[in-house]
């Protein structure tokens, strides 16, 4: 049996709460048509997926171009999904001090043709992931992350104005873990994290979420000599780490049990906290047994 990705998604969506939203790591650049192995934005919408990650560095390494990222983001917005635009430089580009040029060009290409209304309505997210920090254990310092995210926010301000710049979430990704999450989220322009490896284990994922949910700060958008400050307050989260390690139940023959017999997720969220996207791969062992 070669199931579509929505097998796993549907099991999750059966038990999600209004405080947890599902994301998908990629969509096809084609809206319709037979594309074996691909997931269209229409399928993502039918599954109830809210977030659509586009332009992840690993996808770019496989040949995904800026034009493809732009098209996928447009499809996500067209179908009422939230695009998560991934940008980031290679190690040699940072060492050559080209990081701002590279990221700036990626953002311009990704948002080409998008209007302020579209970005606001879709609740668009921009995730800065320096490629040299993804899965390597290396992390941009909080100061490096803040410097780049401030640059990105200023770009958004200059093109779209204050409202969009203050409402578009700009995240940091790249070896975010419990040990550095709080120092990262304290930075003015870091709105949250695109979390990979740390999301694979329940205790560490819960610790990152907890760290991200305990900070109050103000956002400073540079506008010449007149900075614009937007208050940004958060609440806390009471999350059972075991929930994130939820195992899908099967019978003695390895067949999936009905949804009514699957474990139920319970969580209690107080107030608001930054969007956290878990980029946890689904292994063949989790789906095909």
Image: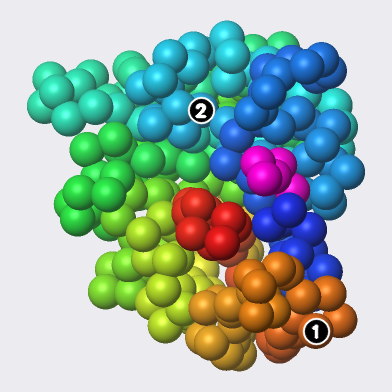
Quarter containing the N terminus: top right
221 or 103: nearer the eye? 103
Instruction: Specify the label residue 89 is tagged with.
Output: none
Question: Which residue carries the number 2 mark?
Answer: 55
Question: Which residue carries the number 1 mark?
Answer: 261
The residues colored magenta run: 1-6
CA neighbours of label 2 inside 10 A, class few (<14), some (14 to 19), many (20+) = many
- Inter-mark Cα distance, 1 to 2: 37 Å
Q: Is residue 260 above or below residue 184?
A: below
161 or 273: nearer the eye? 273
Q: Is residue 42 above or below residue 281?
A: above
Residue 238 visible in the current orientation: yes
Q: In x, y percent, where is residue 183?
A: 31, 69
Quarter containing the C terminus: bottom right
Label 1: which secondary element = helix
Q: How many marks?
A: 2
Q: In x, y percent, where is residue 167?
A: 68, 47
113 or 64: nearer the eye? 64
């Amino acid at each position: 049996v070669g199931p579509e990705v929505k097998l796993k998604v549907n099991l999750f969506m059966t038990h999600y709460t209004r405080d947890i939203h599902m994301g998908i790591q990629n969509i096809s650049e084609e809206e319709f048509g037979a594309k074996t192995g691909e997931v269209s934005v229409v399928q993502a919408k039918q599954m109830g997926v809210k977030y659509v990650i586009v332009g992840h560095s690993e996808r770019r390494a496989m040949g995904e171009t800026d034009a493809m990222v732009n098209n996928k983001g447009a499809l996500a917005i067209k179908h009422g999904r939230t695009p998560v635009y991934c940008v980031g430089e290679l190690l040699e580009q940072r060492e050559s001090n080209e990081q701002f040029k590279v990221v700036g060009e990626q953002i311009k290409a990704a948002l080409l043709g998008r209007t302020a209304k579209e970005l606001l309505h879709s609740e668009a997210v921009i995730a800065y992931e320096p490629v040299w920090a993804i899965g390597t254990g290396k992390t941009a310092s909080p100061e490096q992350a803040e410097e780049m995210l401030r640059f990105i926010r200023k770009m958004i301000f200059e093109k779209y104005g204050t409202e969009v710049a203050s409402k578009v979430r700009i995240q940091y990704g790249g070896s975010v873990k419990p040990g550095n999450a709080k120092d990262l989220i304290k930075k003015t322009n870091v709105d949250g994290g695109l979390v990979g490896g740390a999301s694979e284990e329940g205790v560490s994922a819960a610790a990152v979420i907890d760290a991200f949910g305990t900070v109050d700060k103000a956002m400073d958008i540079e506008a010449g000599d007149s900075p614009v400050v937007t208050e940004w307050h958060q609440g806390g989260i009471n999350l059972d780490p075991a929930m994130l390690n939820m195992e899908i139940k099967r019978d003695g023959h390895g067949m999936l049990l009905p949804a009514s017999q699957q474990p139920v997720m319970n969580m209690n969220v107080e107030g608001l906290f930054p969007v956290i996207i878990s980029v946890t791969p689904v292994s063949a062992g989790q789906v095909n047994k």
